Amino acid sequence: MFGLFALHVALAAPEGIPADEADVWEARWSEIYRGPPGCWEVVGRATWSWDAGRMGSSRGSSAFVGILDDGVWSDAFIRSLGERIVERGEAPITAYAHGEYRFVPLVGRPSQKITQSEELSENALVAIIDELGGDVLTSWSDWSDERDGVVLHREIPVQGGGHAKMDVLFPDGTELPARLDLVFDEPFPLPDAPLVRIRDAEAHIRARHTAGFAFPEAESLTFSASVLGFRAYGAQTIRYLSFRPCGGAAEATTAPLGG
């Protein structure tokens, strides 16, 4: 049985790096999470929904232009496309809070200014992002006929107990990742607020290969949180529309991502 399986893998996988050499794929998976190297001017659109029940909610979308410099986001120009805000005991309002941070990309790392934003300090997003780079409990890789590529499987211990499962796809066995899917199977506490437990958390990142780099194309995050019987829910999606080298001429703009 094992011999037939090994033969099937050998025939299905492209020539090059063996699909089961997990160390090779381990060294490359983070390129989809860190973003392309160098300095890039990024145009995108974000949507979010933060719902704390009777305590209030925020739902809206923004267009943005930001700088991603070697994986770190700096100041961004944010233009609100409308935000429906419900505060406890108040009638719903529609606001246009230009320049206000209501989201943090899963790709890259937020600058200190972004993480110190008052709005972001009150939700679980930053804590979930921090779990992406945890120590790996186990990892292995194999060829997937269904996904037509090598899949790196990672199991990651989560602070406070439990673990998360991550799959990273390398299409056609290339050394650039194109998709990351992360699922937290069990609830886990926030590091700085152990009474708050995060549940049903999932993160997904999709990238496109251009000029030898993995450029993020879209990402999504969903989760719920509970504390002393109170539940809250959060969801965020970001579409990356274009990347342009910092200081580059207009004709240096990369082809728009997505459709």
Image (cartoon, rainbow, N blue to C red):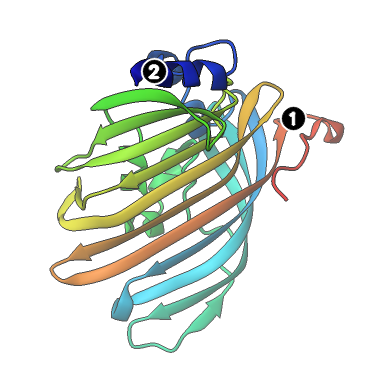
15 and 178: which one is in front?
Answer: 15
Q: Position of residue 77 (x, y in %)?
A: 63, 50
User: Given the image, on which type of amino acid does mark 1 rest?
Assistant: Gly
Which is nearer the eye, 223 or 2? 2
Relative to 100, does residue 71 appear above or below in the rendering? above
Residue 181, labelled with which disc? none
* Secondary element type, mark 1: loop
Question: Residue 192, relative to residue 147: is it above or below?
Answer: below
- Give residue 247's mark: 1
- Residue at image coords 42%, 47%: 203
Total number of numbered discs in the rendering? 2
Report the residue that reaches farthest toward the top: 16
Q: Is residue 136 visible?
A: no
Residue 226, picture quadrant = bottom left
Question: Which residue is nearer to you in this view: 101 or 28?
Answer: 28
The answer to whether residue 177 shows anywhere in this view is yes
Horizontally, residue 225 falls left or right of residue 142, namely left
The answer to which of 123 and 149 lies nearer the viewer is: 149
Numbered disc in front, either 2 or 1:
2
Disc 2 crowd rating (10 Å Cα; few below 14, some 14-19, many 20+) is some
Q: Quadrant of residue 81?
A: bottom right
Q: Which residue is mark 2?
A: 22
Task: Using residue 107 as the reference point, say whether residue 248 is left or right of it.
Answer: right
In the visual, does 211 lie left or right of 101?
Answer: right
In this picture, residue 155 sits left or right of residue 141 = left
Numbered disc 2: secondary structure: helix
Identity, as a three-letter code, of the amino acid under mark 2: Ala
In the rendered image, the vertical position of residue 153 relative to residue 131, given as above or below = above
Residue 156: % across, % down: 27, 34
Residue 27 x %, y %: 43, 17
